Image (cartoon, coloured by chain):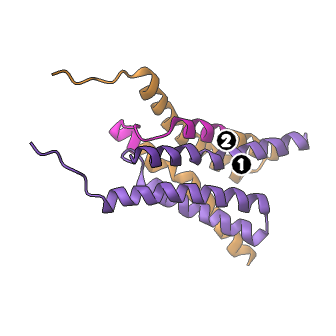
Chain colours: A purple, B orange
Amino acid sequence: MSESLYFIGYVAAACTSMSFLPQAIKVIKTNDTESLSIVMYSVFTFGVLCWLIYGIVLVDWPMIIANVITFTLAGIILALKVKHTFFAKKITKTP
Amino acid sequence: MSESLYFIGYVAAACTSMSFLPQAIKVIKTNDTESLSIVMYSVFTFGVLCWLIYGIVLVDWPMIIANVITFTLAGIILALKVKHTFFAKKITKTP
């Protein structure tokens, strides 16, 4: 049972960390972040940073590695969303 | 130090769980899931379900509560993305 539980934990960590990879790829390829919530990515990225600090203090390597990956991916998405929201002026259609 | 660490852990859990609330609200209000990755939300929701099972087996209540919230919010977003991708025919502009 303990081994099955470890397995579920590893699957859980891999899924929740790596799931941001297809979203990051999609955002980079399409350059479209319209329906993404800037509040979500701000709060989420800060939360992952807290998990990373938590893992570093506990010297828990699986936690450190998983959160470095998630922080990098969520950070890329957030950076593009911030860029599109505040720095990229939308081209308005002229008649 | 231990109390500060617990505090960081609780902040981390609260942020990563609750961050999906503004995204769920945005998706419900705008009905727009265009730039969301269906692969991300499928893999992420499955991962959170695994964390939930992990928490239930360990009878870890903070883990159970955090993952029930995240699973519900991510599940709503995924359901709307699936609906928009497979079931809602886009209205094509007619001349």
The image's mark for residue B47 is 2
Residue type beneath disc 1: Ala
Q: Are marks 1 and 2 in contact (CB under 8 Å)?
A: yes
- Chain part drawn in magenta: B26-46
Q: Give the position of the C terminus of chain B as an image quadrant.
A: top left
Q: Position of residue B74 (x, y in %)?
A: 54, 41
Q: Is residue A19 above or below residue B90?
A: below
Residue type beneath disc 2: Gly
Q: Position of residue A1 (x, y in %)?
A: 90, 39
Read off the chain for label 1: A
SS assignment at label 2: helix
Q: Residue at x 74, y 40 (%)?
A: B53
Q: Would you say residue B11 is visible in this rendering?
A: no
SS assignment at label 1: helix
Where is residue B85, by image quadrant? top left
Q: Nearer the viewer, residue B89 or B8?
A: B89
The image's mark for residue A13 is 1
